[in-house]
Image (cartoon, grey):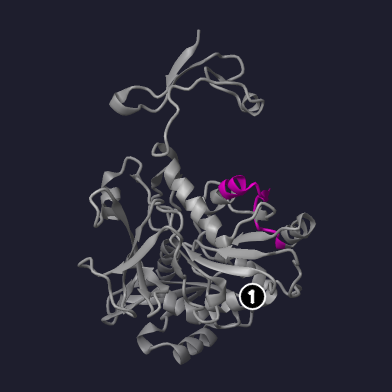
Amino acid sequence: MPVVREALAGRGGRPIAVFATDGKDGTPEGALSFPAALEGEAHPVLHHGIDSDLAMLIYTSGSTGHPKGVMMTHRNIDAASNSIITYLQGRQDDIILNVLPLAFDYGLYQLLMSVRLGATLVLEKSFAFPSAIFETMRRERVTGLPLVPTMAALILRMQDLQPGFLPDLRYLTNTAAALPAEHIGRLRALFPGARLYSMYGLTECKRCTWLPPEELDNRPGSVGIAIPNTEAFVLDDAGKQVAPGETGELVIRGPHVMQGYWRNEEATARMLKPGANPWEKLLHTGDLFRKDEAGFLYFVGRKDDIIKTRGEKVAPKEVEAVLHALPGIAEAVVAGLADPVLGQAIAAMVVRASPELTERDVLQHCARHLEDFMVPKTIVFQDELPRTDTGKVSRRLAAAQMEKAEQ
């Protein structure tokens, strides 16, 4: 006897779909198997849907807490993918190499944009063996490579790579976290024929900003300007735009802003707030930014990440930028640890590129380039930095590990 299963309830509590499991091959009665879908069999639906309907739930990385389900409509996805394709100048003949998880929005959009363009997408499971990936890229004549900082660090640690060794590569992109300026310079030297796009985004709207590659020399620390069909503001606590050079919260307005968090009204209310128009909500990112006179944006840090030490406020990213400039360091993450005297003590977790690097080397380098109150009090050497399931460096996990080491 078939077992009836109801799908998610729609408006008014009515089921959107009802399936009966036939008990034979596991395919619910009334549902379409994947092979049958590929063969193009007709399948009636209860309604045809419109672009404001929910299209997907995609979960945040959980780098600042428990992952949350971001509600995105078809319109949200269409707007985001179209905007990104526009500034990347995507082409039908592009061949994109993707090692990023498809459950991660950066990886998923490689698929969505490839389908939209009619481009070719080459999928690999991981970047654990870069040499094998590069061989695939040469064989497939890959033109586009989406990166995260972890991948960039692995590439730059390889000793036998020659500039221009991937001659077909047309562009590289980076998001998830900002690339250190030192890494940007070295990547450009290694891939002289490719344009490097430094970007900033978050799952709640997919992408916020992009830096035109021709601006890299003038503004190497910037994550650029708002993506097409988007507005980005830097606001103070009173909701007014700050002056150039001042720090405030980045707020995003656009058709790609999420509908909210799945079954989490409290978190939704913190992120989505009324805009100037009565019909829209603006996305308050929780990230601190500043802008220059020309309107280019610079990531300062998350509000929750700011370290308060000796009565001063320190953005971890500023300390990390100095650490990454030391040749013996491959990767670094900075966090504040509770301290009875300082309030918080600055601690750095470091992955060495050179085994000869010592704690004294790191502290002396920091002392030469940072104010005294910004110099880390603790240096912890690790073989690798802690990461979320999507491969993003987790400051929260790093802080927990360093606190445990201090005990």
Residue found farthest to the right: 139
Residue 103 placement, left or right of 129 = left
Whether residue 75 is visible: yes
The magenta span reads: 112-130
Please name whichever residue, 140 or 214, is drawn nearer the observer in this view of the structure: 214
Q: Residue 167 appears at what percent x and percent y?
A: 75, 67
Q: Residue 404 appears at what percent x and percent y?
A: 42, 65
Residue found farthest to the left: 238
Q: Quadrant of residue 310?
A: bottom left
Q: In the rendered image, which residue does mark 1 sit on?
A: 188
Residue 162 placement, left or right of 17 = right
Residue 324 placement, left or right of 404 = right
Residue found farthest to the top: 1
Q: Residue 264 appears at what percent x and percent y?
A: 30, 44
Task: Give the structural element (helix, strand or loop) at label 1.
Answer: helix
Q: Name the image quarter holding the C terminus.
A: bottom left
Q: Vertical placement of 102 versus 170: above or below?
A: above
Q: Is residue 124 magenta?
A: yes
